[in-house]
């Protein structure tokens, strides 16, 4: 049907395959807007319907790992994998990391800077990241030296444009981090108390 054709028409490439008997066992990831508002089981049925001929003939023996995603879900998954890779790079270069938080703040600036001819962006998919690194290694280091160490860890990604900007790079010692958490908790408690008084 048209829905099945739409699902397969925007499918991602085969990720891997291996022969079992006469047919293949495929690990398949399918990305389609046709999956919007469908339950996971209904998405999988849609893919199986589109591949019914191959499944019935034995050309495909089984789909043991079938993943069905909407475009938005796929984009989030890709971004999450990229951030996990960035985090690994930081941990390799900065010793003794006690806490690492990387938040995607991307708002389209990389796209504008890539296509407007200004060369402000090297990659339209470049991310703007809020990074917080907590490490005992930062003890005795000036703030600039701390940031340079983190930027060194992310150097290849920055040079390639995969990371467009680090607008909120925080490099703290463990004691500074604990102080920041206490301050945040105190501010939150004050706000809640004020709201409670306002409701009286």
Image: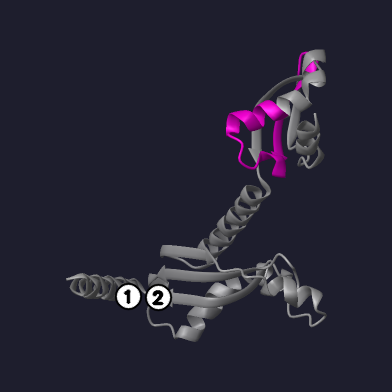
Residue 62 showing in the rendered view = yes
Q: Position of residue 172 (x, y in %)?
A: 40, 75
SS under mark 2: strand
Left or right side of 102 for 191: left
Residue 32 showing in the rendered view = no
In the rendered structure, does residue 34 fall within the stretch colored magenta?
A: yes
Q: Check residue 172 in the rendering and tell me which mark sits there, or answer none.
A: 2
The residue at 61%/50% (across/down) is: 77
Q: Is residue 140 depicted above or below 72 in this figure? A: below
Marks 2,1: beta carbons within 8 A? yes
Q: What span is in magenta? A: 20-46
Q: Position of residue 123 (x, y in %)?
A: 75, 69
Measured Cα–Cα span from mark 2 to mark 1: 9 Å
- In which quadrant will I find the C terminus? bottom left
Left or right side of 42 for 99: left
SS under mark 1: helix
The residue at 52%/71% (across/down) is: 130
**Foreground tag (2 vs 1):** 1
Q: Is residue 181 depicted above or below 28 in this figure? A: below
Give the mark, 2 or 1, whose residue is nearer the N terminus: 2
Left or right side of 26 for 178: left
**Front-most of 18 and 58?**
58
**Front-most of 70 and 125?**
70
Which residue, as the protein is rendered here, is positioned at the far front?
200
Q: How is the image coloured?
A: one colour
Q: Is residue 29 depicted above or below 63 in this figure? A: below
Reading the image, the residue beneath label 1 is: 180
């Amino acid at each position: 049907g048209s829905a099945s054709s739409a699902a397969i028409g925007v499918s991602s490439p085969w990720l891997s395959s291996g022969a079992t008997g006469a047919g293949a066992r495929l690990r398949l990831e399918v990305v389609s807007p046709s999956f919007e508002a469908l339950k996971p089981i209904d998405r999988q049925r849609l893919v199986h319907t589109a591949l019914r001929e191959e499944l019935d003939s034995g050309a495909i023996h089984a789909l043991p790992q079938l993943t069905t995603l909407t475009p938005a879900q796929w984009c989030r998954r890709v971004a999450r994998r990229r951030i996990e890779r960035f985090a690994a790079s930081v941990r390799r270069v900065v010793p003794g990391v006690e806490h690492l938080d990387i938040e995607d703040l991307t708002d389209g600036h990389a796209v504008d800077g890539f296509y407007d001819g200004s060369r402000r962006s090297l990659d339209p998919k470049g991310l703007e990241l809020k990074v917080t690194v907590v490490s005992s290694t930062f003890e005795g280091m000036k703030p600039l030296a701390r940031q340079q160490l983190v930027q060194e860890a992310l150097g290849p990604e920055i040079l390639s444009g995969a990371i467009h900007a680090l607008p909120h790079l925080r490099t703290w010692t463990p004691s500074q981090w604990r102080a920041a958490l206490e301050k945040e908790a105190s501010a939150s408690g004050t706000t809640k108390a004020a709201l409670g008084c306002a409701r009286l």
